Image (cartoon, rainbow, N blue to C red):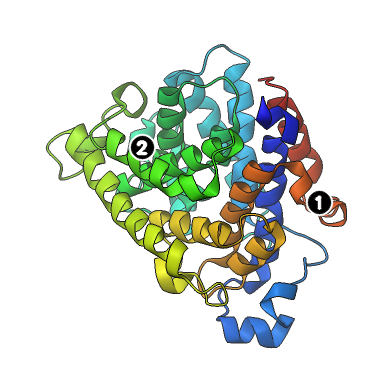
Amino acid sequence: MRGMTKRAATGALIGLALGDALGRPTEFLDTDRIRQRYGPWRELPLPEPATVTDDTDMTIAVARALRTAASRGRLAPLRLTRPLREEFVEWAHRPQGLRAPGRTCLKAVALLTREDRPWQDASQLDSKGCGATMRVAPIGLFPGLSDTERSAAAQLQAALTHGHPTALAAADLTARAVYLLAQGTRPAELVARLVSYAQGQRRVYHERWLGTLWLGTPHRSGEDYVESGWDECLKILARLDAAQHEADPESDPCLRTGEGWIAEEALATALLAFLLFPEEPLTALRRAACTVGDSDSLACLTGAFAGAYLGAGAWPDAWAARVEFGDELRDFGAQWDQGLL
């Protein structure tokens, strides 16, 4: 299997952490200020120390939850929901320092600490922030899942905090992109395959996994609820399709597909940074990190896409050895690259 040969899971997990660390100091700066402070964007240095943000920290929480769920049997709704909930609560109680956790995540997880209430009561139904997508890569890499399990698990981990239908669809698409790239899909084919996937999922509501989540929304059914999210994602994929052929690599990709503060824009702009430089992973990371938008999340996702496609060899040893949480990420990657749960 190609994913085992190139070690796609290891490449994606290390890549997302590197992107996160690279983009952490550039977040909230415009591109002129980034260049003034750090020099040309193609030479953007990895910080010392290479500290990550909540993006990688919550990605590890999802990876740990998957490991716990798999130790109890085949991935299933209740089997995954409990460890996700526990890991998110534990994450919120860790010292955050410079990790800058998102308000939606903190608000929802504070509600998840109350074990007497259904998780659906904690979900922020009006939020489609990029927190839904930034942490989902492990589900695209986890071995042995069916397409339905991968889709439902990706949406579930998003829905625990971000309940807007576009957040669910964008998280699903992000996991799908990571999976396809790990399996060897060529970058030139990726957007078309994601569009086809989104069209096929437009009215698929994973009721066993999401339960009554949609009842808190204005929609008439679960199918209507998810359809609105998929339609929004299809619009951003159309913009991405045009941008991948027309965008100037020297221009900020946020100008074409959005700044990445919301889920569907984070997916599209990170994919654009990757697609502009599919064989140059460090250049793709630097392009994503030197943006006016949510630079750490954009570079984090770009690193996941580039690493899934190119494998562990994408990243220089001198960079990979320095990134925070590298040992734990490599442990997960090694197990999943060997098909172990």
Give x and y (percent) for residue 198.
33, 40
Observer-nearest residue: 182 or 127?
182
Which class describes the residues within 10 Å of circle 1: few (<14), some (14-19), or many (20+)?
A: many
Task: Name the element at disc 2.
Answer: helix
Which class describes the residues within 10 Å of circle 2: few (<14), some (14-19), or many (20+)?
A: some
Give x and y (percent) for residue 25.
67, 71
Question: In the visual, does 63 lie left or right of 134?
Answer: right
Check the image and name the residue furthest to the top. Answer: 73
Type of the residue with mark 1:
Ala
Q: What residue did someone put label 2 on?
A: 197
Q: What residue did someone put label 1 on?
A: 320
Residue 205's place in the image compared with 309, above or below, is above
Residue 272's place in the image compared with 78, above or below, is below
Quarter-of-image position of residue 101:
bottom right
Q: Residue at x 46, y 18 (%)?
A: 76
Give x and y (percent) for residue 287.
61, 68
Residue 64's place in the image compared with 258, above or below, is above
